[in-house]
């Protein structure tokens, strides 16, 4: 994979932490200097590695909030 | 990638649809016959292809709901 630069602008929240210290987090992340997007992803301790994740727009997060209302 | 069997047990909700018809969905999915997990992922029309995604436990979804309360 090509080098990927990222900057975590804001940690919105931490969903869970695994026994090995990986955390599943919702962050506002700027990838390669682009406009920040919301990002739901697993991270190793101290952000040394990143796991699988998905980016979300603000609109998608609002939809998700609405979907989860009755959850 | 090895063949991956999946069964969508329940579509919890659709977050968005792209101009090409890809949808970002929250589903309850059983992968390779295992216990179902919640899954947030992009899908091509008619589920012909799947994009990037992340699986979530019920606990993680509840945390996410709580995180999004003030969003």
Image (tube, coloured by chain):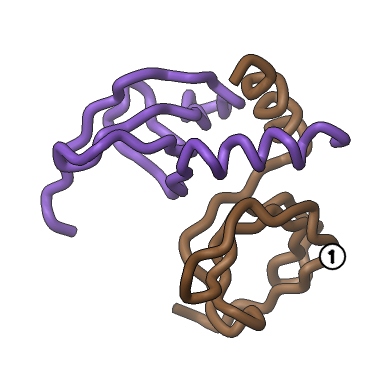
Chain colours: A purple, B brown
Residue at x 37%, y 37% (from the top left corner): A37
Residue at mark 1: chain: B
In this rendering, position of residue A48 left or right of residue B41: left
Q: With respect to residue B29, does A16 lie above or below? A: above
Write down the residue under mark 1.
Answer: B9
The answer to which of A2 and A63 lies nearer the viewer is A63
Which corner quadrant holds the C terminus of chain A? top right
In this rendering, position of residue B69 left or right of residue A53: right
In this rendering, position of residue B30 left or right of residue A2: right
Residue at x 62%, y 49% (from the top left corner): B55
Q: With respect to residue B10, does A46 lie above or below? A: above
Residue at x 63%, y 15% (from the top left corner): B70
Dot 1 crowding, Cα within 10 Å, few <14, some 14–19, many 20+: few
Query: Circle 1 sits in a helix, a strand or a loop, which is it?
Result: strand
The answer to which of B14 and A21 lies nearer the viewer is B14
In this view, the residue farthest toward the top is: B70
Residue at x 44%, y 78% (from the top left corner): B1
Which corner quadrant holds the N terminus of chain A? bottom left
Q: Where's residue A41, x and y in %?
A: 46, 39
Quadrant in the picture for residue A46: top left
Q: With respect to residue A3, does A69 lie above or below? A: above
The answer to which of A8 and B35 lies nearer the viewer is A8
Q: Where's residue B12, x and y in %?
A: 79, 53
């Amino acid at each position: 994979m090509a080098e990927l630069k990222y900057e975590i602008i804001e940690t919105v929240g931490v969903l869970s932490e695994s026994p090995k210290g990986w955390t599943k987090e919702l962050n506002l992340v700027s990838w390669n200097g682009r406009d920040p997007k919301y990002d739901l992803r697993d991270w190793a301790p101290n952000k040394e590695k990143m796991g699988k994740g998905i980016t979300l727009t603000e609109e998608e997060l609002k939809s998700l909030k609405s979907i989860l209302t009755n959850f």
